Structures are given as structure tokens and as C-alpha cells.
Image (cartoon, helix red, strand yellow):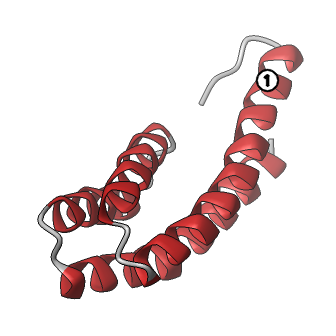
Amino acid sequence: MELASDGDLATVLEIVHQFDEDSVALLHRLSDWVAGDAFPEVASAAHSLKGSAGVFGFSRVEYAAVQLELAALNEDRQNVGRWHSFIVDALPPAKEELTRYFAAL
């Protein structure tokens, strides 16, 4: 990634930081909704996560979020649980890698 100025880097770092905070809160709410079979809320959260993951290039998380959204729309408890678990495991390492990348700039 080529940035035109230190201001650009500061903006990107703020976006990354905001995503980190927002995704932690989203995962907590998502876990509650999965446990409560709140399928519309799960689908909505998965849709949001899909977009954010795509922006940051987290292709595995993006794919899992698509699958989670579809499973929630179909009220498929088994696959909701499966894809939720995958996201819970895959998102933190992806965020750590992103943080390391920007810290090295």
C-alpha cells in the first residue's frame, strides 16, 4: 500500500483501530444472537462483517460471513454455529496480521 502522506497513514490507522474495536463488540453481540437463535440479527451482523472483512482483505472471514448470513437467513442452526465458530477463530489472527502490517510502516 502506498500512502501519499503521514496524514493518510494516520487516517488508515484510525480506520483499522475503529474496525478492531467495532469487531470485538460485534462478535460479542453475534455470540449472544447465535446462542438465542436470533436469526435476523445474526444475518444482519454477518452482512456487516462480510463488508468489513472484504475491505481489509480478510477473504476467509468474508467467505465465512457470507456462509453465516445464508445459514441465518435459512434458520439453519447447525451451520450458523459452524460458521460463527469459524469467524470467532479466524478473525483475531487476521486483525493481528493487519495491525502488525501497519505498525511496520
The correct choice, above or below, for 84 with respect to 10 in the image is below
The correct choice, above or below, for 89 with respect to 69 in the image is below
Which residue appears at 78% of the width and 45% of the height?
Answer: 17
State which quarter of the image contains the N terminus: top right
Which residue occupies the foreground of this view, 77 or 21? Answer: 77
Which of the 4 quarters of the picture holds residue 28?
Answer: bottom right
Q: Where residue 44 appears, x then y in whole percent?
A: 38, 49
Q: Is residue 80 left or right of residue 97?
A: left
Which residue appears at 49% of the width and 43% of the height?
Answer: 52
Q: Where residue 96 appears, x then y in whole percent?
A: 69, 66
Residue with the most extreme left position: 74
Question: Does the image show residue 104?
Answer: no
State which quarter of the image contains the C terminus: top right
The correct choice, above or below, for 33 with respect to 46 in the image is below
Q: Where residue 39 appears, x then y in whole percent?
A: 30, 65
Disc 1 crowd, CA 10 A, few/some/many (<14, 14-19, 20+) = few
Q: Is residue 39 left or right of residue 1?
A: left
- Give the residue at mark 1: 11
- Does dot 1 land on a helix, a strand or a loop? helix
Which residue appears at 81% of the width and 34% of the height?
Answer: 14
Which of the 4 quarters of the picture holds residue 12?
Answer: top right
Q: Where residue 51 appears, x then y in whole percent?
A: 40, 40
The correct choice, above or below, for 4 with respect to 12 in the image is above
Which residue occupies the foreground of this view, 22 or 56? Answer: 22
Q: Amino acid at mark 1?
A: Thr
Which residue appears at 44% of the width and 53% of the height?
Answer: 45
- Numbered disc total: 1
Which residue occupies the foreground of this view, 54 or 45? Answer: 45
